[in-house]
Image (cartoon, rainbow, N blue to C red):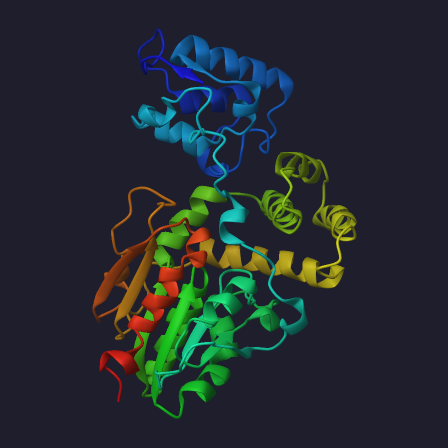
Amino acid sequence: MVVAEKRFGSSGGENVVETVMNIMGIRNIKSVSLGATLSEMGMDSLMAVEIQQTLERNFDLSLTPEMLRSLTFQKLLEYNEGKAKEFNVTEDEDLDFALKDTPTGIELLVRNLGDETRCNEVMIELQSDTLQLATLPTIMIPGIEGTAGQVWYKMAKNINSKVNMLQFHRFAELTSIKEIAEACYEDVKTVVKANRQFYIVAYSYGAFIALELVAMLEKAGFHGQLLLIDGAPHFLTKLTHLHVGENITDNNLYDLILSGVIQTVFRENIRELLALQFSQLPTIEKKMEKFDEYIAKQSVHSSNYSKAMVHAIFRRLSTVKKYDLINFEPINSPIILIRSAEVAIQNIDEDYSLQKITKGTVIVEKIEGSHTTMLDNPILSKLINDFNPSLTGKGN
């Protein structure tokens, strides 16, 4: 891809985002998922030709058909905001702009579907291969899938305390974060009651559950510490609006989830085709039937589990979209935030606005990786160990 200088068309006021929106017949940018590709949003061959020619003619932005199919409104917004330098690459380079293998949309939030064989256990103990120096158990909470995948089993091996994984798949029918936390509360209390202290580590969507649990534990007289892995209400709400869409319809949200889950399971680059197939089906029931056809081609996850996971992710994403960021009652416990070095969104506070969430201190650490790949970074387990209150002298 070749870029000359950035300009705004012959009229001087042309906007690259609005130009593409007009060609595709999109009236409101808030009605689309910024992380979805133009192909996923219904760009046909005629639109593609018009967009390609218009971008080259009016903005000196020359794209191959493959680049155009992978283009998202998020990248167009970045270009529009003066970040043309991200586009200034040659044909031979890894293309940050369109072709870089970075998860977007649902794949950014759903790493895998977890271990189905133990999905209905609320609290499972994960094996640690290290000397358990810490007397305080580490309670881990996964992301939006709500179950422990292999990355958590691997991470637990390097944690020098007892590791309890909180899973909330059993409560897949629940429709609010508070309800999920209340359903898990007794299992959590059983783990922490011996010490009257807690150490909770939560990733991504799990941060919502963790904050509710901490509030409940504090009211019951417990104290402790919360470590959040790239998770916080302000950050996740903004991330969801960016990659899913602020005013997306239920039908379109299911299209994104279904294509994203299949992409996650099969690991094949067929997301655009999937999104197009699902978007052409008029009802959620028909979409689920098509989804079942794909799931039947693999043997890792059963049909019932896969469909339950899709519906659960839909409900949980809906809880994020309507989360009340204003009337949240702050907790008292200190929070450690582990951020990913590869930022998932722009224009957010260094601490993800967590100082608005707690009356305690907020410590921010940053490690290499994206929102998803940071879980594979071995430094993460070291930080989890380092901040265990029973090792830092902050225990009882």
On the question of residue 326 being in view, the answer is no
Note whether 73 is above or below 64 in the view shown.
Answer: below
On the question of residue 136 being in view, the answer is yes
The C terminus - image quarter: bottom left
Outermost residue toward the bottom? 194
**Where, by quadrant of the figure, is residue 41 drawn?**
top right
Q: How many marks?
A: 0
Could you tell me which residue is drawn at 71 percent across and 37 percent down? 277
On screen, residue 386 versus residue 105, left or right, reads left
Residue 249 point in image, percent of width and height: 57, 44
Note whether 196 is above or below 285 in the view shown.
Answer: below
Note whether 256 is above or below 76 in the view shown.
Answer: below
The N terminus - image quarter: top left
Could you tell me which residue is drawn at 49 percent across and 20 percent down? 22
**Where, by quadrant of the figure, is residue 251 drawn?**
top right
Could you tell me which residue is drawn at 31 percent across and 25 percent down? 85
Foreground of the two, 263 or 78: 263
Note whether 11 is above or below 21 in the view shown.
Answer: above
Foreground of the two, 350 or 387: 387
Residue 110 point in image, percent of width and height: 54, 54
Residue 139 point in image, percent of width and height: 43, 76
Residue 106 point in image, percent of width and height: 54, 48
